[in-house]
Image (cartoon, rainbow, N blue to C red):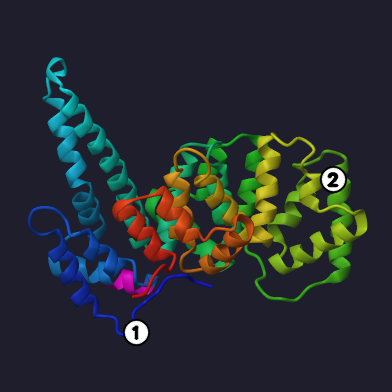
């Protein structure tokens, strides 16, 4: 269930484009207007707005958004270059500490608005490309895209990736990941699963035995284990994992915790959770992003931008069950400014 709220009467793409253009004119940027428009339009509407904006003003909306939202903190950075460090006063330090905090908020706002305004396949291709440049640290992002998207959507992501970066996604993963991670991630991103509800219980029972055998032998990257995870439908996998629990008395992910801090096993457990219970997986990502001192804006932004039109309501329900706190309140406590307002709009907080 999506959390995105769209007004009953949506202005035309031409009107929205005109209002966005007005938000960019003059001193400063009307962030409230940007959030009011883009934070309440679905993917098809946003795509039409981008096309109309390009046709009307001969400008790329994404570039204009980046430039306008980032304009203020770029000005502060340019000004700071010319300061004499020997003449900085306490007042200046306080001012620049405030400016640094403001800059961080603007950068986070720029990121979430940019990702949100993109077409979903374009967004995933962008996230995947960024992740391949920082493997293995960002293996989880590749896994999310591979496991949490329907087969048709994943195919579009791969097509878009090739069109944008002139290489296949699986090629970049192979070039930038180590053996075990490569053996898992490449089959996952190239999978084209059956998306129906039909389940073969005999197959589920047999494959539960295969999985248990491989895990008992510590053969965590065995081709047969990875084949089952990468080709079976999500409903079939749920049946298989239920059979595993019934036959062997443990959830499969519990048996995969033999080496809790092993990075490959952590990714394997995450893939299983993401394939079968995505709301639980993404709730945990959000919880960890806002746990303790500081906020992981990158993870928070990614989850909200990619799940708002899919299952954010389920994620919110799970978050409340797990933490006894509504997600919107935690976001408000951990973020501020336009970044906070954009996130709250996307998770469906408040009335239109």
> Is residue 180 something one can see in this rendering?
yes
Q: Residues within 10 Å of mark 1 (few under 14, many from 20)?
A: few
Quick one: quadrant of the C terminus?
A: bottom left
Residue 306, position as x, y percentages in the image: 47, 60
The residue singled out by tag 1 in the image is: 8
Residue 47 part of the magenta segment: yes
Q: How many marks?
A: 2
Q: Is 111 left or right of 250, judged from the image as shown? A: left
**Which region is colored magenta?**
44-48
Image quadrant of residue 173?
Answer: top right
The residue singled out by tag 2 in the image is: 214
Tag 1 secondary structure: loop
Given residues 123 and 164, the one toward you in this image is 123
| First of labels 1, 2 by sequence position | 1
Quick one: quadrant of the N terminus?
A: bottom right
Residue at x-position 53% and y-position 69%? 313
Residue at x-position 17% and y-position 37%? 76
Residue 112 part of the magenta segment: no
Image quadrant of residue 91?
Answer: top left
Distance (Cα) linking label 1 and label 2: 53 Å
Residue at the left extreme, as displayed: 26
Q: Is 71 left or right of 290, judged from the image as shown? A: left
Residue 39, position as x, y percentages in the image: 33, 66
Tag 2 secondary structure: helix
Q: Residues within 10 Å of mark 2 (few under 14, many from 20)?
A: some
> Is residue 126 something one can see in this rendering?
no
Q: Is residue 204 above or below residue 266?
A: below
Disc number for residue 77: none
């Amino acid at each position: 269930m999506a959390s995105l709220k769209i007004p009953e009467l949506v202005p035309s793409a031409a009107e929205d484009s005109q209002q966005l253009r007005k938000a960019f004119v003059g001193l400063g940027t009307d962030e409230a207007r940007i959030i009011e428009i883009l934070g309440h339009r679905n993917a098809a509407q946003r795509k039409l707005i981008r096309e109309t904006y390009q046709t009307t003003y001969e400008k790329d909306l994404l570039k204009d958004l980046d430039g306008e939202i980032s304009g203020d903190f770029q000005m502060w950075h340019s000004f700071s270059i010319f300061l004499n460090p020997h003449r900085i006063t306490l007042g200046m330090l306080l001012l620049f500490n405030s400016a640094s905090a403001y800059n961080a908020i603007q950068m986070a706002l720029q990121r979430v608005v940019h990702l949100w305004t993109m077409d979903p396949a374009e967004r995933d291709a962008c996230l995947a490309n960024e992740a391949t440049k920082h493997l293995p640290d960002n293996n989880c992002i590749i896994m999310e895209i591979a496991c949490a998207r329907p087969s048709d959507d994943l195919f579009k992501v791969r097509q878009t990736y090739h069109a944008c970066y002139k290489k296949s996604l699986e090629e970049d993963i192979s070039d930038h990941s180590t053996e075990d991670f490569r053996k898992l991630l490449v089959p996952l991103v190239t999978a084209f699963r059956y998306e129906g509800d039909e389940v073969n219980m005999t197959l589920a029972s047999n494959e539960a035995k295969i999985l248990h055998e491989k895990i008992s032998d510590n053969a965590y990257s065995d081709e047969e284990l990875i084949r089952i995870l990468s080709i079976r439908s999500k409903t079939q996998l749920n049946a298989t994992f239920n059979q595993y629990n019934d036959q062997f008395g443990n959830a499969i992910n519990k048996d995969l915790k033999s080496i809790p801090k092993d990075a490959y096993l952590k990714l394997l457990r995450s893939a299983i959770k993401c394939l079968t219970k995505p709301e639980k997986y993404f709730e945990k990502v959000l919880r960890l992003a806002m746990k303790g001192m500081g906020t992981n804006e990158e993870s928070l932004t990614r989850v909200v931008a990619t799940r708002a039109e899919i299952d954010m309501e389920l994620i919110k329900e799970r978050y409340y069950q797990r933490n006894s706190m509504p997600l919107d309140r935690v976001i408000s406590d951990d973020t501020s400014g336009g970044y906070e307002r954009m996130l709250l709009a996307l998770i469906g907080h408040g009335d239109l």
